[in-house]
Structure formats: C-alpha cells, structure tokens
Image (tube, rainbow, N blue to C red):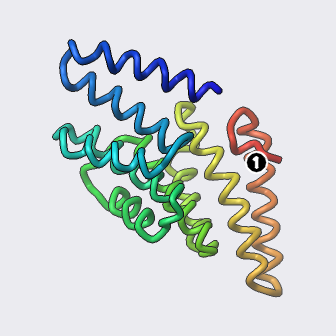
C-alpha cells in the first residue's frame, strides 16, 4: 500500500502548496495524476493530466504530461491513441529530457507489443537501450526495454520460420539473459 501512502502524502502537500507558487502546485498535481494513472483509475488520471495541460506553459512539464497521458491511454487499452502520443514526443525536436525520451520509446514499444506488432516493438525498445544503456539514472527504463525487447524478439520468432526464427530466438534469449543479469534490481530482471 505504498501507493496509497504516497497519494495521502502528496494530497497533504497539495493542501499546503496552495500557499506557495503555482509551479510547485502543478508539480504536486502531476505527481497525484501519475499515481492515479499507475495505481488507480487511469481515466481519472487522464482527466487530471488534461486539466494540468491547460494550466501550464512550462515546456518540460508539458512533455512529462504528454508522456503520462500516453501511459494512461495504454492502461485504458487505447493503444492507437497512445502510440500516436508517444510517436509525437519522439519526433519532437524540442524534447531533450532523457527520461521523457526513454519513457516515450518504451511506451511506444508497449503499445506495439500489446497490438502484437512485435517486429516494430523490438526496435522501439532497442531505441531506449541504444540511447541510454550507460545512464545509471535510467536503469529502470533500460532494464524494461531489454526485458520487453527480448520478449518481442521471441514473439516475433514465433511468426517466422527457418534461419530467421533461430536468429531471433538466439538474440531474444541473449537480451533476456542480459536484462536478468545486468538489471536484476529493476523490472527488467524478471528471469
């Protein structure tokens, strides 16, 4: 019940933040919306994010809001809409935040995976790994990309035959083993 405790703490901070500047309040509200998206009602979280989006002009917050909206759409199984949101983030030349880029690449991969577009998903996850493998601060995102990327290779192998199937299976096993070995402390270490 860590999520409930975190939500209660953020709600308490939100009540106190009304006396502080608006940017602080917006960040607290973003935290509450994130909790709703990940552990509560994603539709309610999406509504909160859309409300926040209308209230701020801060580009970095707008990028985070866009990514969280994509995550809410994934939780709501609206994969086409979510994929468009993540793709828009990835195509933007203005977005420089590595956390946003990694989250969007993984989010796009998750949409493709759920739609059984495994050939596309494996490359979306590979993007996160290629860009951020050396960043310790993004270990959670890189671990997830490796794990789900490995799963994507294995699922795609089931759609083909012959040498291509064997190649995808070998590569998928190597990627899954690396995720389990190097990212044991993250969700990527699932083996």
Against 25, residue 85 (above or below) is below
Q: Residue at x 40, y 16 (%)?
A: 12
For image coordinates 45% across by 71% down, the residue present is 80
Q: Position of residue 7 (x, y in %)?
A: 49, 26
Work out whether residue 120 or residue 164 is closer to the camera in this orientation and state it: 120
Side of 65 relative to 146 (left or right): left
Name which quarter of the figure residue 62 lies in. top left
Q: Where does the image place residue 151, in percent across and percent down from the top left?
A: 73, 62
How far from the left and from the top, in percent, is residue 111? 53, 64
Report the number of discs.
Answer: 1
Which structural element holds mark 1? Answer: helix
Task: Decide if residue 159 is on the left or right side of residue 109.
Answer: right
**Around disc 1, counting alpha carbons within 10 Å, would you say few (fewer than 14), some (14 to 19), or many (20 or more)?**
some
The answer to whether residue 92 is above or below residue 24 is below
Of 101 and 68, nearer the camera is: 68
Provide the residue designation for mark 1.
178
- Front one among 153 and 8: 8
Q: Residue at x 28, y 57 (%)?
A: 92
| Residue in the picture at 45% in, 38% down | 34
């Amino acid at each position: 019940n860590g999520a409930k405790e975190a939500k209660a703490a953020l709600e308490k901070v939100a009540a106190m933040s009304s006396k502080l500047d608006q940017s602080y309040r917006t960040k607290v509200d973003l935290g509450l919306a994130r909790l709703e998206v990940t552990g509560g009602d994603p539709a309610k979280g999406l509504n909160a994010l859309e409300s926040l989006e209308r209230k701020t002009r801060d580009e970095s917050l707008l990028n985070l809001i866009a990514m969280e909206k994509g995550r809410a759409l994934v939780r709501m199984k609206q994969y086409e809409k979510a994929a468009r949101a993540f793709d828009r983030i990835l195509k933007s030349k203005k977005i420089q935040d590595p956390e946003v880029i990694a989250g969007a690449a993984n989010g796009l991969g998750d949409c493709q995976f759920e739609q059984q577009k495994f050939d596309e998903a494996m490359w979306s996850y590979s993007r996160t790994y290629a860009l951020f493998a050396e960043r310790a601060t993004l270990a959670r995102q890189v671990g997830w990309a490796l794990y789900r990327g490995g799963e994507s290779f294995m699922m795609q192998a089931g759609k083909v035959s012959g040498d291509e199937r064997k190649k995808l299976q070998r590569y998928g096993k190597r990627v899954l083993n690396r995720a389990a070995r190097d990212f044991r402390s993250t969700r990527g270490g699932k083996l």
